[in-house]
Structures are given as structure tokens and as C-alpha cells.
Amino acid sequence: MYEARESGLHLLHPLTKAALALCLVVAGLVLPSRWTGYFLVLCVVFPLALWGKVFTPFLRSLWKVSLPLALSLFLIQSLFWGEGEILLSMGPIAFKKEGALFALVSMGRILLVMADFILFAMTTRPDTLMISMKQAGAPSGLAYIIVTTLQIVPRFQNKASTILDSQRSRGLETEGNIFVRARAFAPIVLPLVLGSLIEVEERAIAIQARGFNSNKEETSLIEIPDTKTQRLTRQALILATILSIVARIAWQLLN
Amino acid sequence: MAIVELKNVTYKYPLTDSPILQNINLQVNEGEFVAVVGPNGAGKSTLCYTIAGFVPHFFKGELTGTVEVAGIESQTSTLNEWVLNIGLAFQNPFNQISGAKYTVYEEIAFGLENIGVPREEMKARVEEAMKLTGISDLADRSPYSLSGGQQQRVALTSILVMQPKVLVLDEPTSQMDPIGTREVFGVIRTMAENGMTVILAEHKVEWVAQFADRVVALHEGQILLEGNPQEVLTSDLLMDNGFGISRYTSTAREAKKQGLWKKDMLPVTLDDAVEGFALTLPSPDWRGKK
């Protein structure tokens, strides 16, 4: 997902970006207005994407991920909303206004989380994230898992399509009605899962053979530039995040 | 002096009834190149994992006997101490890539980061190791964009850079095409020439014969035969027990029955075969044109 560019956003310390991303998501969820999500995406995430010189690929990814979700959310919420003002009806099917509104509000929040995550992943090299997490005291196992997860999705897709093709070439029917598709599920998913488990075991051996679990203090090849301003910004962002959660809970309790 | 010493080693994987290794006694001297051959399921990989400490530390199971490398005993030390003395590479190059690094250069530095080598020393060691294995030109590539042979060379370099005392290679070329095989064996040759202690499990006996100081033939978890590569690899015992043997050996064996092979020893490599057949085949024209 990472897009290499020379931009101020790319040069920020990974943890500064992570803190900003966290703060934004929390703000979108706890601020009282129902439209905060859209507001933050338009007024904060989009300008950041422009600054990071990744606006076009960012928008493309966001569109691809959010469109199916938005459509299904809208259909399900507006069709199955219990009581409400009917916007449009076709025979037994009726779209309800309250449901559509609920979908729109939820979508704003989901959009914020997705936009936030996509921008973060696009402008942060996973290995620098791993190093900075370790420097901040996170256990190296955790840092490794987070980073490899970011890289594993395309490899997993590749493997799945190889398995799909080879099962098809052995005569497995993968197209047709829902029952045909359901039958094809096991022969595709089982090899994928079993193969991945074997891969995980081998990789565990390979990285341990290279001293992954060694108790020695780790060093890093890449230097990650950090400044006092950024450190202070990070602390402020995290403080703001915690405070806004506390404020929201307090507000909820008082009302 | 023996740097690797296995005494009466018997090992059983968890949840299995019969031992995969039975009463193995093996000594490897410093600087020696020992090849382990054997059919599938003979226990080659398990033997490699045992020397590398993953048996029993990682796989659990029951191990009896003693495994000693560089004067330390496997069962009384932890895996983390143990791996520092030993470099392990295995079949699938893809699974040996850490998955956390962007370039080959950084991938090779991964192990050094883990054991806390200072940055300047790290760079010097990475560059030296890449030069040794001839992959300096790949430094800025992504490890995932490489061919199998290149990936395996990166995996070998990632281990060499850690300066292990013993190198354990478990069929490093089994998933390679002929070009990849040649590339990887080029690196193995360099290691052997540099006096590294190497234990190599390998099917491709023609290659084994070129490097190994000694060959160990493993069969059903036991050492069937051990000794000079030429003698072991051409022995009838191997052929009778389903070992892979070189096509040159089997050709010369047939020729011998017809009286067309005059030498005592059967060949393992192309060069030996050419040399031997040159003694018997009538026309001199083709000689020297191999």
C-alpha cells in the first residue's frame, strides 16, 4: 500500500502520524455532531493527502473500499428500518427515510476510519513503523506482527487466486448459484489456511534463526529522524485523545 | 577438532510413535564440508533442525543423546543462545524472507539488528557479505521481486552476515530451476572455499560430489553409510535402498556390465564420466569436446 513520495507527511515520524490517526478516529467517534466524520475527512484527511502528494491513489483506494460498503449499508438500513417515513416504495419493498439517514451518519464515521487508515498506510513505510514502535518500547513480536500484516494482504490474495485457478483446472465449479459456490468454499479455503499455517511455521524458524528472539538490545539500520516538536505534538495528541474519551463518557453519564 | 558432535541421538516428533532419527553418531570437524543424502522421509531435515537447535527447542518431542556445537550442549542451552553459533537455510526461499523489510540490503541487516550490532559495523558487514555472495547489484531491489535463485542467495547472505560458526543448509536448491541451482551452489562453493564448516542436506548428488569432503547417507533415520563422497555416492547399498544417484553413475554401472567401463570407481560427475569413458570408447574424435 505504501506509496513512496517526497513529502512533508512522509518525513514525519511514524509515531507522530499514528498518534494523529488515532486522535482523528477518536474525535470522529466522540464529538457530538453526527456529521463530524465527513467534516474531518474533508477538512483534515483530504488536505493531509494533498500535502503527502498521494491524493489520487488515496482517493482511488478509498473509493474502491468504501463504495460497496456504502451501498450495502444504505440498502440494508433503509429497507429494514422498522417504522418510518417512506421515501420510495416498489410493491413490498419500501425505502425508509430514517434508515437512509442512519446509514449516512454511520458511513461518515466508517469513512473517517478508512480514510485515516489508508492515508497512514500510504505514507508510512512499514519497516520505519516497526523500528519506531520498538524504540518506543513495544515488544518486537507485536511490532513485527503489525508490520507484516500490512504487507501480507497482497501476498494472501495472490495465493488465493493461485489456489482458485488450480482447483478450477481440476474441475471444481466455482461459478453458478449459491449452492455451487458454497460447495467450492472448502476446497479453496482449506489449502489457503493450511498452506498459511505451514508458511507461518517456516517463517518463525527463519526469523528465529536470525536472532529475532535474542535478548540483546536491538539496533536499526535506518535512522528515523525525530524532533522535539514532534515528540511534544505526539504527547499533545495522545493527551487530547484520552481527554476527549473521558469527556465523552462524563457527558454521557451526566445526561 | 570436532565442532559439531552428535552422540547416540534419537528423536521422536510429538504425537508420533516411531523415532525419525535413531542412534545418530556424527562428528563434523572445523572447516569440513559434510553432505547428507537420503530419500524423502529419511530424516535429513530433522537432522538439520537438530543441529540448528530447533529440535527439540522449537518442535518439542523427545530427544535422547547429546548434541554439541562449539562446545555447548543443545539441551542445556536456550534456542536464542544456540542460534548465534549456527546459520540455517532451508528449501523455500520465499518463507525465509522476513517480510518486514523493503530492500535486499535491509533484509540482510535484519539479523544484525536483532542481535544489536552498531549501525556502522552493520553496514560494513552487510556490504562485505553481499560482495562475497555476489549480490551487491540486488541491494536496492525488493526481496519479493527476485527470482527463486536470487531470493535463496539473499537468504544465504542474510545468514552469512551473522558470521555463524557452522552453516546448516537443508536442500537449499530443491525448489530451484537449473539456473537458480547453479547460482546457489556458486555461493555454497564460495563458503566452502572460505573454510566455513558446512552441513548440507541435498538430493542433487552431482553437485554434492563437487564440494563435499565427506558424505553421510541417511536411511530411515539411521546412518547407512559414511565416508568419501565418490565411494559413498557410487555404492550399491545406496542404489538398493532407493537413494537418488547420479545419472552418470547409473550409466557407467550399466556400461560396466557390458565391459565398457574399465575404471574401478564409478563416476558421479560429468567430468569423471567423460574421463572414464575416454578410456574405452573407440573414436578419439570427441575427446576434449565435452
Image: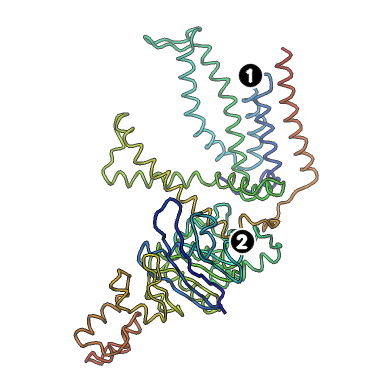
The N terminus of chain A appears in which quarter of the rendering?
Answer: top right
The kind of residue on which mark 1 rests is Arg
* Number of marks in the rendered image: 2
Residue at numbered disc 2: B77
Position of residue A246 relative to residue A48, above or below, is above
What chain letter is assigned to the residue under label 1?
Answer: A
Q: Nearer the viewer, residue A98 or A148?
A: A148
Residue at numbered disc 1: A34
For mark 2, does the 10 Å Cα neighbourhood hold few (<14), some (14 to 19), or many (20 or more) residues? few
Position of residue A31 relative to residue B174, above or below, is above
The kind of residue on which mark 2 rests is Ser
What chain letter is assigned to the residue under label 2?
Answer: B
The colour style of the image is rainbow
SS for tag 1?
Answer: loop
Tell me what residue is drawn at x 57 percent, y 22 percent: A106
Alpha-carbon span between mark 1 and mark 2: 60 Å
In the image: residue B86, left or right of residue B286: right
Where's residue B239, x and y in %? 29, 73
